[in-house]
Amino acid sequence: MSAAAVNQAAETRADLEKKRNGVKHANSLLKDIVTMRWLVYPASAAKIALIFVLGYMMFEYALPFSVNPFQPFLTLSYRIPESEVVLRLAQNPIYGPTPSYSLDNPVTTALRDFFRSTHAKLFPNEPKLLRYGKGWLDVCFMGFYIIVFSFLRQVITGHIFKPLAARWNLKTENKCVRFAEQGYALTYWGVMSIFGLYVMAFQDSWWYNLDHLWYQYPHWQMRPELKLYYLLQASYWLQQAFVMLLGLERPRKDYYELVAHHLVTLWLIGWSYFINLSMIGTTVFVCMDIPDTWLALSKMLNYLNKNMAAAAVYSVFMVVWSYFRIFLSALTLYSVYADYTKIPAYARTFHPSQGHWLVWWMQCHVFAPLFLLLLLNLFWYALMWRILYRAINGVYGDTREEGEDDHGKEE
């Protein structure tokens, strides 16, 4: 056989191998989609997300179509025309007293002013009446960001915090896994705590001025950052629910309480968004995220055997948890009970087309999930005092994770 024929045969074999590999990769991605393994494999999640990004760019910049079918997945939908925003403001005039914005508290007032001035610098040309509504296309947005959070979770845990755990000599696999999980939690809750305060800075209920949760109902003309914040929170908690139900994290002793917490949180997110109570939703998010940031940090220090630093951070966490998850959560719950009648009379009717849902019996539907969430907070509060008591006596660690290292050794 001539050299040219040999080279041609080799090229043919190489082409066939490339085609087989291409089919193999395509089949593998399809299998990951069908079996939901993309929740675990960041490469598969990245490929799925890239399909949507490339599709969006193709329809936006290359194809001669006026409608981009990928737009609802990547960007917010249902922008309200400015004329309609003005009309709705005229139909539902400002009700109740002017909010004080906690003028008696210079710290929170300065924080609010900081977020508002930062927003003005970042978006100097944003229309004053830029508002969004809601609809079924929001499900598309959440679906895409469930994929994004799956990718981020695996990358942050597997490629950032697990290598850090190995570098800092965490010896057991269970501790490495838990350290990485808490690293992701610290990253998410830290970012969303700041984002939540930023969103709240534009609301009349800033720093738990709870009367104003009710005066301006319905809250259905959403600022863009509010809608983005709400949908990202929904995407995160849905993704976390998939992680828990599919057993991607080793269950703790309070597994069923965590499942209940996830279900109640999703109930609160969906229900408050559906019946136009996004302002109260923001206050609840901030109550949850800020304490959880400190909890994640204290647990990471504990895994690293930095016992004194962990105890110091945990002490701060107990104060923060007591204030946000107990005191402010109870205050919000009481506001549902005592201030519900501050809703304008015209809005205490059942007219969904006008955004009005809060007839008298709806008070129970708002009160119930917040009450269940407070009960769960009190359950964990008791556990946390037990952990603090043990730490004072020189025993460090989360009682919910006891025995995990022994279990890992047995395996």
Image (tube, grey):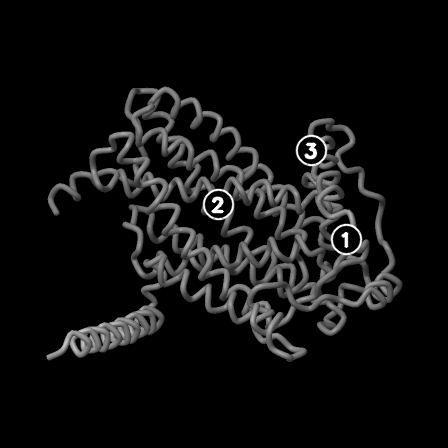
Q: Residue at x 52, y 60 (%)?
A: 267
In this rendered view, identify the residue nearer to me: 403 or 1: 1
Split into 4 quadrants, where in the image is the N terminus? Answer: bottom left
Q: Residue at x 29, y 30 (%)?
A: 168
Please name the amino acid that badge 2 sits on. Answer: Tyr
- Disc tally is 3
Q: Residue at x 17, y 43 (%)?
A: 408
Secondary structure under tag 1 reads loop
Q: Residues within 10 Å of mark 1 (few under 14, many from 20)?
A: few
Secondary structure under tag 3 reads helix
In this rendered view, identify the residue nearer to me: 240 or 5: 5
How far is the residue under mark 3 from the one under mark 1? 21 Å
The residue that label 3 is drawn on is 111
Q: Is residue 388 left or right of residue 235?
A: left
In this rendered view, identify the residue nearer to me: 18 or 206: 18
| Location of residue 157 with respect to 359 vertically, above or below | above
Whether residue 211 is visible here, answered yes or no, is no
Please name the amino acid that badge 1 sits on. Answer: Glu
Sequence-first tag of 2 and 1: 1
Q: Residues within 10 Å of mark 3 (few under 14, many from 20)?
A: few
The residue that label 2 is drawn on is 188
